[in-house]
Each structure stands twice: as C-alpha cells, then as structure tokens.
Image (spheres, helix red, strand yellow):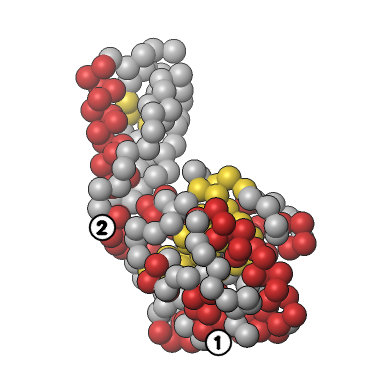
Amino acid sequence: MPKLDPATKKQLIARVNYYREMGIYDFYRRPVEEGGVVESAEPAAAAETVIADPEESLFDSPLPVITDKRAALKAIREDIGDCTRCRLHKGRKNIVFGVGNVNVDLMFVGEGPGADEDEQGEPFVGRAGQLLNNMIAAMGLKRSDVYIANVVKCRPPQNRTPERDECDTCSPFLMRQIEVIRPKVIVALGAVAAKNLLAVNDSMANLRGRWYEFKGSRLAVTYHPAFLLRDPRQKKEAWKDLQMVMKYLGLKTKVSTPGE
Ligand code: SF4
C-alpha cells in the first residue's frame, strides 16, 4: 500500500479535524486505483473523504479536541434540519435534540420524546422528566450539570417503542452528540437506549449492575423513569445503579432513594 507523504498527511489530518469540528465523524474508505486522497464526487456527502491507504494510521492518533462544543452541537442540529429521514417525522411537533451543559461528566440517554417533550421540544420534561430530575438531584447534581438526549428525536405515535429502523436512522446523531460531549459516564435509561448504544439484545436484569466501555466513556444501564413510575418498587434498584455512577464520579450521597 502506498504511504502518504508527510505534507499530504498533515493536510488530511487538518481536513478531518475541520469536519469533526463541524460535527461530522463518519468517514468511508473506498478502493481507489492510485494511492493518495480522493474527494467524494457527491458534494452533499462532504464527509465522505476517501482514504486510499488503510495502513496509514491517520485514525490511530488521538481524536482532536473539539474546541467549541456548542458550535459542534449546533452543526449536528443543523444537519438534522427539518428531518424526514424516518417515518417518525410524520406525527411530531418538534424535534427533541437534547439539553444540558456541554462540559459535563454525566450524560443520560433515553428512548424518545413523549407528548410533553414533543410539545416543548426538550427531553424529559413530563412526569418521567420530573422523576429524572429527582434522580439527578439525589446524586447531588442539577439538571444543568448533565446532558440529556434520546435515541430517537421525534415522538413515536402513541408513545410506542421506536422500531429498529427508526433507531438505526436516528442514532447516528446521538453518537455524534456523545462524541462532542465526551462525558465520563453515560447512563442508558431503559432497554431501548441500552440495546441501541451497546448493540446487544439482552434483558435489563443482565444489562444492569456493570460497567461498559463506550467511545472512551463508561456506560451504565438503569431503568427508564417512565418504567419506574409504573413500578416504583424498582426505584431502589435504580438507585443502586446511580450509586455505582456516583462512586465512580466521586459524588456524595444525599438521600436514600430518589423520587420518594
Ligand atoms: Fe429524523 Fe430522527 Fe426524527 Fe427520524 S426520529 S425523522 S431520523 S430526527
């Protein structure tokens, strides 16, 4: 395989960094006849920079630091636009992108917006959101100390579980949000979030109570607040999950069980 000369390599790294600052992280490699770098012919697919030499370790180097996280998130939101990429766009009022501080250690990921969230354009603002706020407060934090987002950004009709293809279509935006935020810990709220992030199909009983490595962050799984509203007996179990997170983040316990 041909090697890139240092000047070209430097240029390419700068270009990749530029795209990442724009919130674009996915690159595709296509076979080309000659070595070097070939730009995609599709202007709409600006991110499709083609790297001819797979041995060239451009992507082995540490990811560059996002210098302006807010701008990067804004770029992702602009990329979503008035999205019609999956059928969930049909019934929505608002795209629910995400909310919170960009410089946080902790990020919560839920399943998708409900009626209140769809109305207000913000995740976790209904009853389940109030319980999540209580859970966050029990950890000694404020809602503004964390970042909150969902796997799908439009409300599924009748609050049904988002389907596989809907999650697959929308979750790349979440992955980009995570790449920008780069929290120390991600808490997946419920099975849909956990299964989508971890690409596994397992029960909550098996998914909870342990750490996972995820894109340089640690990931823990707990119950979705909406589930806890339906079955409050599980709050104690959820609290155990949060205590595991608190221990790792060095947060002090303030109350016994959130939401009580
Ligand atoms: Fe687009 Fe995501 Fe909404 Fe589907 S759920 S329409 S992919 S923003």
Tell me the distance, in whole angstroms, between the alpha carbons under discs 2 and 1.
31 Å
Earlier along the polypeptide chain: callout 2 or callout 1? 2
What residue is drawn where x is 40% and y is 84%? 120
Q: Which numbered marker is on residue 127?
A: 1
What residue is drawn where x is 63% and y is 50%? 211
In the rendered image, which quarter is residue 53 located in? top left
- Residue 152 rendering spot, x and y as whole percentages: 52, 67
What residue is drawn where x is 31% and y is 42%? 65
- Residue 191 rendering spot, x and y as whole percentages: 67, 65
What residue is drawn where x is 47% and y is 83%? 125
159 or 210: nearer the viewer:
210
Horizontal side of residue 253 vs 98, given as left or right: right
Horizontal side of residue 3 vs 132, given as left or right: left
Horizontal side of residue 194 vs 203, given as left or right: left
Please tell me how many numbered marks the rendered image carries.
Answer: 2
Identity, as a three-letter code, of the amino acid under mark 2? Ala
129 or 7: nearer the viewer:
129
211 or 8: nearer the viewer:
211
- Examine the rendered structure and indicate whether residue 216 appears above or below residue 229: above
Badge 2 element: helix
Residue 248 visible in this rendered orientation of the protein: yes
Quadrant for the C terminus in the image:
bottom right
Identity, as a three-letter code, of the amino acid under mark 1? Arg
Instruction: Using a 10 Å C-alpha cutoff, classify the residue at mark 2 as few (fewer than 14 neighbours), some (14 to 19) or many (20 or more).
Output: some
- Examine the rendered structure and indicate whether residue 45 appears above or below residue 106: above
Q: Which residue is mark 2?
A: 71
The yes-or-no answer for disc 1 within 8 Å of ligand 1 is: no
